[in-house]
Amino acid sequence: MRAYERAAQLSERDGDRARRLAAAVRAAVEAGAFGRAEELCDAAAPLTRDPAVLAGLAGARSRLAFERGMPRTAARVALDGAKGIAGADPVAAAELLVLGTYYAGHGVDTGLTGEAAALLDALHLPSDHPFRPYMRQARAFHRLSTGEAPDPAAFAVRRPRTLWEQTWTARVLNISGNAVAALEVATDMVAAARAGGSAGHLANALFHEAGAQLVLGRHRAAAEAAGPALTVAVETGQGSVAAYLRGLLAWLAAAEGDADRCRALAGEAIRYADDHGAPPSGADATWALALLDLGKGRYDAALATMENRWPFWPCSSAWLRSAADHLEAAHRAGSADVAARLMDGLDAASGRILDPCGPAVLARCRALLASGDEAEAHHVEAHYAEALRPGPCDDRPFDRARTLLCYGEWLRREHRKADARVPLRTAFDLFRRCGAVLWAERARAELRATGDRSVQAPADAGAASRLTPQELQVVRLAATGATNRDIAATLFLSPRTIAQHLYRAYPKLGISTRTELAALDLGT
């Protein structure tokens, strides 16, 4: 960034100066220096009419506005920038419009998403141009934003080549519930961001990695990605991604049963969403609060929270999974009309749900609603058999365990205690492996109700269990002999922040010096 700035100072012609300032803007964004990037944009814009330079500046300004919590402004900047270069550089215009659609969706402004979709339709790109799939996905995102179900075929993805394509692809894969592929793309993004020193991209890449790990039931891995990402996002002023990360971490805390942490994180995310008019950034946080109540058996509270949630984007993976929790809360709270309404909505969308695990989740919901009528027991069994059939849900241990728990509970209520023990034991094991302590306790309580007292409460997982994900990552690196400065460079944090993490971690581990770390079992 500094080298490009100096090159701009030495440039005699305005066009050269603008081009080099625009390069400094890109470097500033990559470095996470968002305040400096804005100053450089202001310096470069009056110096040029070059479409390529203007497109780069519009993209940077749009990103900066989004991270400051102004998604509608971000979308407007992107759309206006695209209009100015559509004739001269339609590909750059298309990139801006795709981003504008995404930002407008987060601002819940369907007028802007529709405008972006119309502008995309008017661009002159060859029908076989490699950017066409991303344009189709942006139009599908517009349909999600308006409450319409998109064509699932629009979410088919190509192998991404550039950082821009990686970021968009990871986002699309997570929205559509293709978590294995999303994790692969996000892992590549994280590696590239670390290797290139791109603090401005690291938090977002780690967010997508954490989201995929969460869906795959790898809750500890998700927390270990999201915790450092939140620190980087806060330190670099990326308010929007920080809100999403807090919601994700709140959901993980809810599954673990850490009520204080869940409420603190969720409260911050929801306040941000309310203050900035961006409901999607608080959606996971609201869901997390409901999940906490659902796991603790406070069904009326869970239902009240879910009734007030922002409904995600119809047919997306989060919409499916949160709607299933909403339906379960309604069923267990005795609100049959609400549960029936939700089931009708799920059934109506069944052929358009993007998540490959959709049929299994819907089958679990049908089983729950059918379980109240003893005369329909054979139908309940059929629904649970469908929900547990081998298929796309095999790599979703938390979702599978939720189904097994529901099945075991129903079998016990049917006075089939011996039959209930098998799914309940499996559910307990899956929850425990995920780190979903609250739900493991629910499965253990059900097992005890069947007369099976062989499963004990989870033991302390060792020293590592007492640390936050960020502290654990720091002490693992410190145990290798890395200095605070080395660790700071690896994690894109300041040496002072590393020292603070170690200061908080040592008492939890029962040690007082760095050399004692090597003797501890910190896991892998």
Image (spheres, rainbow, N blue to C red):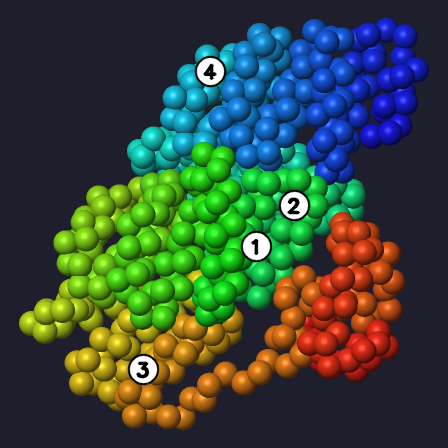
**Residue 125: in sight, yes or no?**
no
Q: Residues within 10 Å of mark 2 (few under 14, many from 20)?
A: many
Give the spatial CA distance, label 4 vs label 3. Answer: 56 Å
Is 80 located above or below residue 134 in the figure? above
Query: Residue 228: x, y in percent?
Result: 67, 55
Report the residue marked by disc 1. 210
Report the residue marked by disc 3. 446
Mark before the other along the chain sequence, 3 or 2: 2
Give the spatial CA distance, label 4 vs label 2. Answer: 32 Å
Mark before the other along the chain sequence, 4 or 2: 4
Which of the pair 310/141 is nearer the observer?
Answer: 310
Give the spatial CA distance, label 3 vs label 2. Answer: 41 Å
Q: Residues within 10 Å of mark 1 (few under 14, many from 20)?
A: many
Report the residue marked by disc 4. 119
Q: Secondary structure at mark 3?
A: helix
Q: Secondary structure at mark 2?
A: helix
Q: Secondary structure at mark 1?
A: helix
Is 192 located above or below residue 419 in the figure? above
Give the spatial CA distance, label 1 vs label 3. Answer: 30 Å
Report the residue marked by disc 2. 233
Q: Residue at x 73, y 81 (%)?
A: 510
- 333 horizontally vs 48: left or right: left
**Residue 236: in sight, yes or no?**
yes
Give the spatial CA distance, label 1 vs label 2. Answer: 14 Å
Mark before the other along the chain sequence, 4 or 3: 4
